Image (cartoon, rainbow, N blue to C red):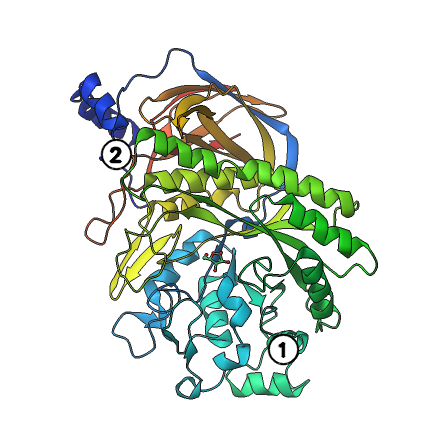
Amino acid sequence: MQNTKPVDKILLSRRAALRRLTAAAAAALGAMARVKPARGASRPSAAAIAVRVLLDERRGSIRPALYGHFTEHIGGVIYDGIWVGPQSKIPNLDGIRLALVEHVRRLGPVAVRWPGGCFADRYHWRDGIGPRERRPRRFGRWRDDTEPNHFGTHEFVRFCRLCGVEPYFAANVGTGSPEEFQQWVEYANAPPGSTSLAEERASNGDREPFKVRAWGVGNESWGCGGKFTPEDYCAEYRRFTEWVPGYGVPLYLIAAGPSGNDLGWTRRFFARWADGARAPIHGWAPHYYCGTTGHALEFSTDQWYEMLHKANHMEKLIADQWAALGEFDRERRIKLVIDEWGAWHPAGTEINKAHLFEQMGCLRDALAAALTLDTFNRHAEKIDMANVAQLVNNLHSLFLADGEKFVPTPTFHVFEMYRPHQGAEAVRLEIDDPGVAFKAGGREEKIFRLAGSASVSQKKLTLTLVHAHASEPAEVSLQLRGAGAAAAAAARTVLAHPSLNAHNTFENPQEVVPRTGPLDQRGAELRIVLPAASVNRLDISL
Ligand code: AHR
């Protein structure tokens, strides 16, 4: 962690700052739309929230791929975000932005999806190989801009290798053919010299195969990926996957799932799939965005809760989609792959108008990311991979880059804070959650106040907790139960800020960063105060 200011000092300075706000002024600030939201109170509510970690109740291993990313040829993700070109004065490795590589490396051996998104269903992989200056220039998928194809298969694999992540390719069903897909797999994976495509790959600089395991067969096939019916997409899926060569690589094939929690798409696809030859499917890929109608940075307290509430729908989506899969796949061979998720705000906060869908990410987005990662951890046995949309200069991004400027968003810090969960064993967590009431669309709603997840690796317990209350801290009484349940040492890391819309900028990159400090408690029961609107990680040696 970059900053080591002790947590208790932060809490004290926050309390001092908050004391300056009168209750009336704070209430007015919280209620007004389009003002900088602020906190109203500083004391924990009377009763401590009970949290129990059940160390003996294991829920499966948390694959690093759950913490994956998505990189599409759209706006500023590839060009300006990842690719600056080898001649650029921006520090780069073979044309790839160095600062990005250094930061992605900190996030673990995750999976990264490319080249789309909607772009995937009009991408012809041959456009992106061979000498760069001779590659065809095409209309971009998203605007009438030009796709130069300077970033193609070799450049993406190079990016993945530099970052230590696994490549996940999304193939073109909408405007491509089964043959084109199969040849892409062959080009990527055939052993040296075994076929003409393997030789072509070598002549383009990579003799050794890329060994790409994960392949998406189309994207959002109900929409930009071809506007198929589930039945028609299932027929296409069969054609595309019938003769895919493996070349010794155990392919992991992913079918395009629904928009959100559309169970109709899932059931109709699998009814056709189960009716006759069952094409190989390893992952089923729903997409879920928690969209807002407001503004990425200007929102009321109710809108703060509303977005977190929407992000929390991921829980139901996973439960429902998993149950629907089980109706057709009784052996449970097919897992969920949530290869697009994140917060999607209306346009207006982009730092570069050419970066389509770029938005500023603030503390609210960081909490949405944290609670989504906690949700994945709690369902680790059902999910093989997930990819936040998108890595840089786009929707729920971890980074913003513009020319020479580069800054990690609060969401980056959440991914880094959550890294110790990767590869650990999820364990069950019980929270006696009191909830928080709020209003959305004139209706009374209730959202969780405290959510989280826990995992164990050897004798280390990682507990992450999202505290949603916008203005009050919470006292937590944490009990460890099961074999060896006593803390020998503990530390904590907190991401919080007095302003709900706090965010990092090129000028002020450290506005929202985690703070780490020791937690001077031992035993099977700990008491901790969590700041309002915070993401918290406890590292406990058992
Ligand atoms: O992430 C942006 C777009 O959102 C993707 O291209 C598409 O798959 C989704 O609709």
Q: Is residue 477 visible?
A: yes
Q: Residues within 10 Å of mark 2 (few under 14, many from 20)?
A: some
Q: Nearer the viewer, residue 374 or 290?
A: 290
Image coords of residue 441 (percent x, y): 40, 30
Q: Which residue is mark 1?
A: 180
Q: How many marks?
A: 2
The residue mark sitting in front, 1 or 2, is 1
Disc 1 is placed on an element classified as helix
Q: Is residue 459 visible?
A: no
Image coords of residue 392 (percent x, y): 37, 58
298 relative to 75 in the view: left or right: left
138 relative to 19 in the view: left or right: right
Image coords of residue 253 (percent x, y): 66, 61
Quarter placement of the N terminus: top left
Instruction: Please state which amino acid type lies under the numbered disc 2.
Output: Ser
Q: Which residue is mark 2?
A: 499
60 relative to 329 in the view: left or right: left
Residue in view at x 38 percent, y 46 percent: 411
Q: Nearer the viewer, residue 313 or 346?
A: 346
Outermost residue, top side: 46
Q: Is residue 344 above or below residue 98?
A: above
Q: Residues within 10 Å of mark 1 (few under 14, many from 20)?
A: some
Image coords of residue 384 (percent x, y): 62, 50
Disc 2 is placed on an element classified as loop
